[in-house]
Amino acid sequence: MACDIPKPYYLPWTKPGIRVVTSMGDGYTMQIVWNRAFASPVSYSLAYNIYYSTTPFDMESQNMDLIIEGPKFVSTNIITLTATILDFTPGDMFYFVVRATQYDPDWFNLTQLSQDPSQTDGYLYVYPETLLSEDIDQTQTNIPITDIDLFPDHGVVQIGQELVRYLSKSTDSLTGVERGFFSTEARLHTTDGYDGYEDQDPVIHFWKGIEKTDLFVVQEQSTFSGQNIFSPTDGYRSQDLEGIVVSDMGTNDADREDFPPYDYVGWHRTQPSRLFTGTCVDTYIGGESFCADGYGGLNQQIRGIPLYEQADRLQEALLEELGTGQPCVLLKRIWNGITCSCMTNNQEYPDPRCPKCFGGSFVGGYEQYYNPRRLDSRILVRFTPSTEDVKMMDAGLESSITYPCWTLTYPILDDRDVLIRFKPDGTEEWRYEIINVERNIQLFGKTGKQSFNCQRLRKTSIVYQWRAIRNTEDVPVTISTTVGLLRGPGGTVLPHVHTLTISNNTTTISQINQSTDLSSGHLHPIVNGVVLDALGHTHQLILP
């Protein structure tokens, strides 16, 4: 074959072939992206040969098995320059090369080649291969082969080092052939690969065109990752139902959420504020509750209140009765569930502006906590005075402040939870991210006061777009959505509903702007009563 044959080229020439390969996270699928090539002459058609193998290319030993195995597919995708290939072996490391190839449209039409039925990419075709059914000499004008049905009506095949163009085919042979096509040498060929000079590969290959012989290799492992991908077999595989980042302190919440309020009767008699200010003395604290003469039932007087329970009472009294605590909405960051699609195999962190996970990795991002001890469902937080600093940053003036805070032992707070703080008129002030949580341990391992810092989030943070219900005063009402169908493993569907807590003042669905609770590893934002789509399904709201 002549050495001065024009080949495809790249602009700039320093960026040939493959660009990136990405495992799609389901263990079986890879996406390949390559750079655009240009045909020369422009009348030629362009395609891309895709090579891959588990055998690495060794620059020192020049191990060429990756290329010798031949292209696994040829792609006619000249627009988006991508291919999605299925059926890789999970856990194996693969090495990829993409080479641009060109051909005269009169020689063959790649779209007449067969496609692999296991693939879904409509641009991928497979080069057919076969064997000679009998020996031929250098002048023979019909080529008897096996598997004749695999080959298109006309094309070019490679037998050893010779290219043979054929214009038609019969039931068992390629006919109308041109031997020694494209300046190659016509030779005899035997069924075992001998061509009169040396032994060749006996396999007859459909010609892969005039190829740009660059060798830029990209390696990628076929892995299961935290990417939100649905497969008919596994459903939404990337579910972390336990959570390994923060400690699960749910048993503490269940144990402490129902401690009785400070009763202000019996030996207490007066409000703690009078006791703390010294206007009431000689009052026994913590040893007795209720009355022996019928309050709460005859002989229901209780002495010896548990130490940790009494501590919780006093802390709540400090926050509630003395007014030192500020009611805040708590958004609990989600640490398990269905991983958001913004988490890719080559990106360890979520997109900080993702509207699905709000920068939190898992679909929904946060779950609002509803405090059963207060009608407004908020928690009480003591903000210690702190210095606010307005800094000059590259993007302009930036407000920065971090408050030392404390709150009750219930609910358990985790780093990266979010507090919504309000102004005296009830409007939202700022949102704060909780950091550096410290839990005081009392006697016998019981958790005491929680201390933490909360840092102000800039108004451009995606967290401000998380829709929370600010107040559930009067009578909080819990409603359910209609049943939604989440695609599960094996083509099944998982029926489920979500609940949400709304204010009794809500009279129309359009007033609801918040988020549902977690169910089946995800939640849905609600905008003006419309439940937004998540994971390919949605729900409807129905007021009781």
Image: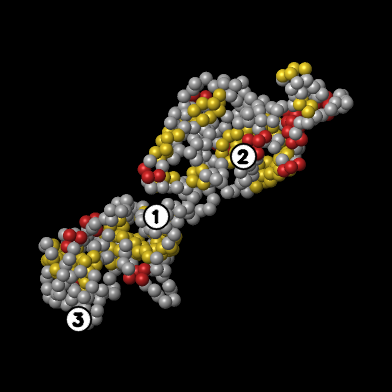
Q: CA distance from mark 2 to mark 1?
A: 37 Å
Nearer the observer, 206 or 43: 206
Residue for point 64% across, 25% down:
375
Reading the image, the residue beneath label 1 is 28
Dot 2 falls on a residue whose secondary structure is helix
- Look at label 3 and name its amino acid: Gly
Reading the image, the residue beneath label 2 is 250
Quick check: 228 left or right of 465?
left
Q: First in sequence, mark 3 or 1: give its number.
A: 1
Dot 3 falls on a residue whose secondary structure is loop
Reading the image, the residue beneath label 3 is 196
Quick check: 28 left or right of 289?
left
Residue 155, image x, y percentages? 19, 63
Residue for point 23% across, 73% down:
202
Q: CA distance from mark 3 to mark 1?
A: 44 Å
- Look at label 2 and name its amino acid: Gly
